[in-house]
Every structure is written in structure tokens, then in C-alpha cells.
Amino acid sequence: MPLKSEPVEVNIGPQHPSTHGVFRMVATIDGERITDVKMIVGYLHRSMEKLAEERTYTQNIPFTDRMDYLSAINSNLGYCLAVEKLAGIEVPERATVLRVIFSELQRVASHCMATGAFINDCGAWQTPVMYTFRDREKVLDLIEMTCGARITTNYIRIGGVAFDIPDEFLPALDRLVNDDLPQRFDEYDRLLVGNEIILMRARDVGVVTPELAINAALSGPMLRSAGIAWDLRKADPYCGYDTYAFDIPVGYNGDSYDRMVIRIEEMKQSLRIIRQAVHRLPGGPHKTDVPLALRPPAGEAYARIESPKGELGFYIVSDGGPAPYRWHVRAPSLINLSVLKEMTVGQTIADAIVTLGSIDINVGEVDR
Amino acid sequence: MPALLTLITHNWYDIRDLSNLSGKIEQLIRDANGPGWLVFVVSALLGAAGIVSFIGAVAIINIWIERRVVGRMQSRLGPNRAGPFGLLQPVADAIKLMQKEVLQPKVADGLVFSLAPIAFTVPGILVMAVLPWGRNMALANLDAGVIFILALTSLGALAVFAGGYGSNNKYALFGAMRVIAMLVTYEIPSVLALLGLVLFSGTMNLSGIVLFQAKYWMPLLLVQPLPFIIYFISSSAELNRTPADLAEAESEIAGGYHVEYSGMKFGLFYAAELINAVSVSAIIATVFLGGWWLYKVDEIVPGWMIFIGKIYAVYFLFVWTRGTLPRFRIDQLLAFAWKWMTPMAFLNLVLVAAEVLIWNETGVSAGLVLPLYAVLNAAFAGVLIVAWVKFMGPRFSRFPERLRYYSQIDVPSLPAVATRTDGGAPGLAEGRSA
């Protein structure tokens, strides 16, 4: 006689150790299998896009820090690129190279966090996350050395960067990029990439097919894990990324494991970019003079960058006034999250947590 | 020097064996013509007091040990603020937990909910009673000691189930169901592993097993490595420790069975987990590592000190696995038990039975046959593990070269993302005042 059972609805989040903030998903489960997932976002909504319409262009930069607070410099960069495009501001060469250095450092920090948190979701009891945090701390030390802040940097400004690098920055960067981090990444390769339990937990879990990835407009490691070679640094270069030599790692299976490996590889590629950028760092000013109450001509502009999470786009409409008329953010976390249902239905609860961890969402960016 | 040793060891009572102390007290009672039952009551109470005080110390100090050791593994310091080296941290934790309000969900089954933490604590303490702490230092020298400890170690899972089920919470129910699935799965290999030892040593009495190892100068770990591995893994599953902490699974089900517990009830769960870990470590130290016996050392150093040292050596292994391994999924964990551990344990049992038969029939001297068996069984274990990984294990290439690298990518004709400066955005005509 078959046992009678009925589906149960389980709230995962908003207060849950593994939802990376205040994201909530309501899973309908049959035993341990998930049959349906409802995603509920908005617990961290701060109405940034509306608030930005009341503030000047320069005053809006701190909002971008607080969207994806794990890669604040990348968010700064995307926004500033959009405003510069709108206002037709030329950026000095030194500022462009500094932007590349810092956005790649920030990418390393963000991917460190993503990798550690992902293994934590796989159930390793805090150890990998402590190791990756240790490396992230070193990167944040460099950022702090330059701009005084660690998380919400507000470093990249319209027309350049806020501060020039101090004298002790380049030796410290050299130590980090050439000694410390390569050793750490080899350690990740040994401990994580070949780990049998992580293979069992992450292989074939949370699979995204290439068709689904394109239809859902995924980007970043999510898209590349599905086997599609797409990186805005190559496809639509900004900040002179087309002049740097680096590779785009692309997976085959589209599963959580591929995403983890891609992130580790991307960190190595970021170090390559930083080495080249340090080599070519020119002298000169680190910013152009831009009025604080900038009044770009009426019009619209869209700028997009490859943030650690994916394609981060800023769409700005100006009516000629000191504040943007409309400000819209294409947040990669939100769009990558939209396929969660397709990825998790049919899996167990434990797999769903691993899948969610591998998307690497940042609720600050999802909700804005 | 020998005179000094004699002074220490033969004055009043011999600290190498605490049973001398209780023997002395019993003698005093007998000399005073006390009733016969009083002797039994007093010796039982003395033993119980010793064990409970040890357990109390364990519950306090292990919090510190575990957090410090894992802290070192995680390249951080661990608790170091309260007291020297953070030694007072457990005290601070306990005081905090006692001050917190003990919440109980309205829908919970009150009796089951309240009894579960207590029921979880008791078996771990009871196990200590049958373990020999020294040559004559078993509080209850049961002839069926192995069966007794097997029964007790599986009781803890029932308490976890009661706590999870009684909480009336979905996460707790998950934890409860998982713990039962793991109980029925992992009990079999652990029983079979210990059965091999019982066959080999010919006794179920834990003191007897230790004496067997002392007699032949051979810890059973060397003779039977495979049961050690099996028992270690299955007991770590029963203990809810990290490669198999599915009933708790903080990252998945947010604490599982104890998600609704707070205050000292939670503290009791927390302490009992440490107590159970020490109990299982003590079982492993007794049956595999020779308990209080350590070659000639146990004639100088008190046996119970050697025993505690061995307990913490095994406990360190548990902490080590907890600090380094990610968690299995429930189906993977159960499949591992049914497909690997249970068949291995059966094969091992057959092999051990054959070995014992050969030993008994031929009457070869133990000095010859035990090293031979040690090598044979280690080879057997190695072959089985390698063969299983090769033929039955998950089909993964170990270091997959599975990423492609692109230095150039094809860009399809992109829609122009152009900047418009003609003021063509909708709604701009009326605009806001700039």
C-alpha cells in the first residue's frame, strides 16, 4: 500500500543562514524533493532608483556602493561610465588604468566571497569561507589603503577616481598579486576543485542549459558555465579592456560546480590583468575636473560592465538638470536569480541551497 | 627514584588505580561492621560521582577545545578574550544560555519537547559506566558490555527524533526524519564492525577486550583497520558531526531538530553533543586502541590518564573531520552506508571469522599470527577501498580539465547602444524644473 503523503510548503528565508541576505523562497516539497519554488524578493528594497532622481549625479555614486556591496567599485564604475557617456567626459589615461586595477581587485574580492559562501552552503563548517575571507581581507586592505573605505568605497568618480594611489600601494599590490594570491589559488585548486564531496554535491546540480541561459538573459559566470563564451570585457570593451591579454573560462555543463571553478579561474585571470595594468600605469592626473552639480545635456545613455555577478547596466535619462530624470539599473543578481525555479525543481532541499549559493546573488543588488 | 615512586604509589592508596581508593573506603566500612549493602551503595556512588564529574568537566572544557582547534584549522584564533587563552569562554557561554528565556512553541508537544534534551544527555553518560578506566576501574563490569554500548549510542538518535518531532516545526521535522533514516542505516555497519572485534577477542566484556589487547601487546586497530574506519564513519554519522551532520545541517535546514530550542534546553543539546562525542571517542579508544593499556607505560602512569589521553586523540580526529569536510546529501550518505560500509563490514566479518578459526585450529603462537593478520587485514582493507573507488565509486575525473578558455570571442552584430543627445526621451517636454 503506498503511503499517503501531501506536499508541504517550507519557507526558506527571509531569515535563513543560506539565503545570502533577506531573500525568501517558498518551496513546495514532497519528502525531500522540491516540486515548486516561489521567489519573493523586496525585503531589502530601498528605492534607490527613485531616490536618485532627487540627487545630483555625484551624490548618486554612494547608492551604487550599496547595491552590490561586495563589489562596490564595479558598481561605481558602471554608473560613472554611463554618466561620462551622457555628458561626454573624457577620462585621463591614469584614471582608466587605475579603474581597471581596482575593478579587478574588487572582482577577486567578490569571487573570494562567492566561492567561500558557496562551499559553506555545501555544508563545510565555516572553514573554506574563513580561508577565502582571509584573502579577501588582503584585497580590501589595498582598497582601504587607497580610498579609506573597505566595503562601500565610493572610489570611482565621474571623470576619474577619487584619490591617487599612495606610495606604498604598488609594492603591496606586487606582493599580493605575485606571491600571496597565486599560492592561495593553487590551494583552492587542491582543496576545493578536486574535492570528492564537493564534486558529489555540486556536479549536475542546478543545471542551466544554454537555451535557458540565453532566453533568461543570464550573464556572468552563470552564462559562461552553460558553455557560452560571453564576457563584456571582450564583447563590448570598456576602460580599454580590449588591450589586455586575458582568457575567458567557459564551462560545459552549466552546473554549480562549473560556476565555482569558473570563479576560481576568473580570479587568476584578474591577476593577469592587474599585472599588465600595473606595468602600463602612466603618470598624469587621476581625474578631470567635473563640476559637482553636473548638468549633462538632455538625452539618455546606457553603459554596461562585466561585474563579478554578470552584466551590470546603468541606464540614465537626463533632462538637462542636475539630477537624473530616470535612473534604471540592470542588476545581474536579479536576472540571474530569475531562473532559480527552473534550476531547483526536482532537486532536494540541500541541492536548492547549493544552487542558490552558486548563483552568487547579492540581495542588496537584487532589491536595490 | 624507586623509593619516591613507592612513596607516591603505595602510600594510603595507589593513584594509578582509583579503585584502590574505593577499596579502602569499603574496607573502612567493613571494619566498622557496617551493613553489607552499604558497601555496594558507597562504591557505586563513588564511581558515579567520578564519572559525572568527568562528564561535567568534559562538557565545559570541550567547548573550548573544539572552538580553539577548529579556530586554528580555520586560520583564526578562536575564543581568546574571556580569561587566559579564552578558557573562561565556556563559562561565559553557559551563563549567557542560562539567562536566556526558554521559549516553547505553543503548538509543540510540551512533554516530548522538554524531555528530549535530557534524554539526549543521559546515554552519553551511561556509556561511561561500562568502560574500563583502569585495570579494575569499570563501574559496571558487564559481560554484555558491547551490546550495552550499542544500545545506548543509538538511543541518542531517538531523543533527537523526539525533539524534532515534538517541536512541530518543518525544519525540525526534516532533522528528525533524517536522523531516523541515518539511525537505521548506520547502526548496521557499526554493529557489524564491533562484532568483528568481539569475534576476534572472544569476549563482549569491554574489560576483557582491553585485557586481550594488553595480553598480546597489540591494539586491535592494527589487527582490524577496516572496522575502525567503518565504526569511525558510522559513529560520526550517529553523532551528527560534519560530514554527516544532516540532522542539524545549519546551511540547509537552519539547525534542524534544535531549531526551536533556546536557552538552557539548547545548551543541553549542545553539551550533550560534546558528551556523546567524548563517549564515542571513549568507546573507540577502548575497543580499538587498548583503553587504559599502553605497553609498559600503564605500570607507571595511571591507566585512567592514558585512557583520557586516548579519548582526546580520537576526539581530535572528530574535530578534524568537522573542520575540513563539506556535508553529504542525505541520499549520498545513505547510499554510502548501504553500498560501501555494510558490504565491507560483512566481508570483514567473514574474514575475521576465518582468521579466528584458523588461529584456534592450528594453535599457532599469537606472536606469529597477530602481525601476520595485521598485515593481511591492512592489505585487505586497502584493496577493498581502492576497488570500491575504482568500480563502484562516483564516476568523476579527479582533476577535471573541464574549462575552455577563450582569448577572443565572437560578437554577433550588437544592437547599437548609442548615446542620444537629442532630448528624445519620452516625457521630457514638460520636464521638471532643473
Image: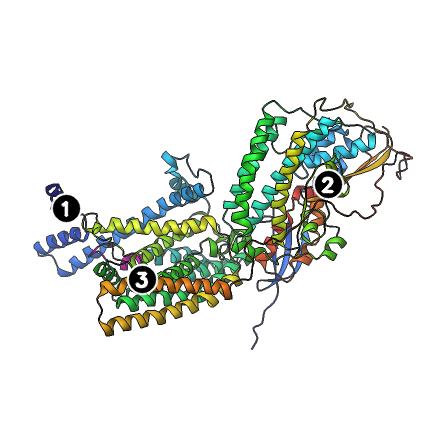
For marks 3 and 1, give the CA distance.
36 Å
Q: Nearer the viewer, residue A358 or A331?
A: A358
In the structure shown, which secondary structural element does the residue marked by tag 3 occupy?
helix
Secondary structure, mark 2, is helix
Q: Residue at x 38, y 41 (%)?
A: B91
- What crowding class fits label 3: few (fewer than 14 Cα within 10 Å), some (14-19), or many (20 or more)? some
Tag 1 and tag 2, C-beta contact below 8 Å: no
* Helix, strand or loop for disc 1: helix
Residue A142 visible in the current orientation: yes
Q: Position of residue B52 (x, y in %)?
A: 29, 51
The stretch drawn in magenta includes residue A150: no
Highlighted magenta segment, given as a residue range: B126-138
Left or right: A210 with respect to B275?
Answer: right
Residue B144 lies in what quarter of the image?
bottom left
Looking at the rendered image, the quarter that the N terminus of chain B falls into is top left
Q: CA distance from mark 3 to mark 2?
A: 61 Å
Give the residue number, with chain letter if any, for mark 1.
B9
The residue labelled by disc 3 is B374
**Overall secondary structure of the magenta section:** loop
Q: Position of residue B173 (x, y in %)?
A: 52, 60
Q: Amino acid at mark 2?
A: Arg
Residue at position x 54%, y 45% from top?
Answer: A188
**What's the residue type where badge 3 is placed?**
Ala
Q: Which one is closest to the eye, mark 3 or mark 2? A: 3
Discs 3, 2 touching: Cβ within 8 Å? no
Quadrant location of the C terminus of chain B in the rendered image: top right
Residue B218 pos. (x, y %): 26, 59
Mark 2 — residue?
A233
